[in-house]
Each structure stands twice: as C-alpha cells, then as structure tokens.
Amino acid sequence: MDPDAVAKAFVDHYYSTFDANRAGLANLYQEGSMLTFEGQKIQGSQNIVAKLTSLPFQQCKHNITTVDCQPSGAGGVLVFVSGTLQLAGEQHALKFSQMFHLMPTPQGSFYVLNDIFRLNYA
Amino acid sequence: MLTFEGQKIQGVEDITAKLTSLPFDKCRHVISTINSQPSTLTGGIVVFVSGSLQLPEEEHHLRYSQMFHLVSTLEGNFFVQNDIFRLNYG
C-alpha cells in the first residue's frame, strides 16, 4: 500500500464528488465515522451526509493547494489537505484545512474514519 | 513521522534535529482552534490545531495548521506517532 497514491486518489475523488453531488459522499463514511465541521461534532454516515448536503450553498468548487499524508499504523492513512473553497456568487474564495484518517475496507478500498474541517480565516 | 512543509522526516532524532535547526531562536505559538477525535481503530487520538506563530522581530504572525496522531504508550501516556505541519499562506 502506497500512502501517497491512496491519498492522491482519495483527495481527487472526495472533492470532485463533493463539488458535483454531496450526497454521493455517503459511501465514503460508515457508522463509526466522525466529522468535526467548524467545531461541530457529527457521527455516522447518515448524519454526516445530512450535514454536508445542508450546507448553505448550492454550488462550490474546491481548489487543492497541498496534500500531505502518512501511514497511521493498522493499514490506515492520515491525509492533511489545504486549499480554497469557491462558492458560486462569492467574490472571495474561502481558505480551508482538512484532515482525514482513512481506514481500509475488506473490499480493498478506504473509508473515512475521522474527518476534521476548518476554515482558515485571515 | 513528521511532515514539515512537505519535507518527510522519521524518528525522534531526525525530527528533533529538524525542529531545533529551524532558522530562529525564539518563537511563540498562539493557538486559535483545537479539534480532536478518537481514532477508534488505532486506539489513538487525532488532534487538529490552527493558530499563529510569532517570531521575534517579525512584524506579521505566520498562520499555521498542524495535525497530530497520538498513540498510547504501555505506561498510559501518549506519544506523537504522526505529525503534519503546514503554514497557511495568503
């Protein structure tokens, strides 16, 4: 398992799915998955997708600036992302940082166990 | 493991050597946010920090984000198994 390859594939898939159809993120999370979104703690795939699909914008585009990753032991991969988030109709892009802890599935792919998202204000 | 602004370093000695060789004598971290979650399958904790780093004689603070994956030791403490640091520019 090459953590860099896993991280790159995951980041590409996650943000393109987020930008096209947030409901499609459901199969990247499981019951034990946790999201902390700007300090709010949410657990489980259903609740996480409910939160993400209810965010107050229709369209957005993530532009990724940096991706760092490390193996976390037990076959997991930690991924640390920074970038900008452009909302339709907003003049200025928002800067964000996000970390994921990915764990392997029996089918040979990965799901998100831990997810923490923060906007980076000026 | 430490990834410091994209540079990968492994092991206590090499990590300490990197941190002590950073090009400043004094600095002060001011923490803005801390978020953490249990990493249930590794028995550890993931910690996500954002804040600013003030270097003496520099007028403007540097903003940064950093994540740690803490894993418990046999003695009941935690050590840093994973550490990723990034400055937040712009």
Image (cartoon, helix red, strand yellow):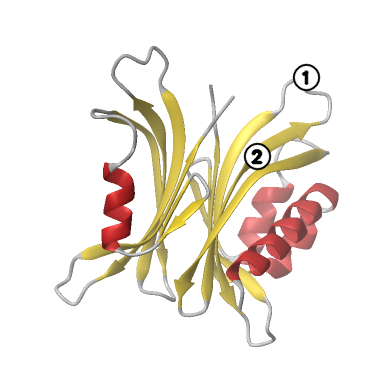
User: Which of A106 and B29 lies nearest the eye of the viewer?
Assistant: B29
The local crowd at label 2, few if under 14, some if 14 to 19, many if 20 or more residues have their Cα within 10 Å, is: many
- Residue A116 against residue B21 in the figure, above or below: below
Q: Quadrant of residue B60?
A: top left
Given the image, on which type of amino acid does mark 1 rest?
Gln
User: Is residue B49 found left or right of A11 in the rendered image?
Assistant: left
User: Is residue B33 found left or right of A24 in the rendered image?
Assistant: left
User: Which of B46 and A38 lies nearest the eye of the viewer?
Assistant: B46
Residue at point 71% right, 27% down? A93
Residue at point 39% right, 12% down? B59
User: What residue is pinned by disc 1?
Assistant: A91
Chain for disc number 1:
A
Q: Quadrant of residue A79?
A: bottom right
- Residue B80 against residue B54 in the figure, above or below: below
Residue at point 36% right, 62% down? B45
Q: CA distance from mark 1 to mark 2?
A: 16 Å
Q: Which mark is residue A116?
A: none
Mark with earlier residue (1, 2): 2
- Residue A68 against residue A73 in the figure, above or below: above
**What is the secondary structure assignment of the residue under circle 2?**
strand
User: Which of B5 and B13 lies nearest the eye of the viewer?
Assistant: B13
> Marks 1 and 2: same chain?
yes
Question: x and y percent of residue A21 in the render?
Answer: 83, 53
Q: Which is closer to the viewer, label 1 or label 2?
A: 2
Question: x and y percent of residue B10 in the render?
Answer: 38, 63
User: Is residue A99 found left or right of B48 in the rendered image?
Assistant: right
Question: x and y percent of residue B16 in the render?
Answer: 27, 52
User: Which of B34 and A67 lies nearest the eye of the viewer?
Assistant: A67
Given the image, on which type of amino acid does mark 2 rest?
Gly
User: What residue is pinned by disc 2?
Assistant: A83
> Going by the picture, which residue comes out furthest to the left?
B75
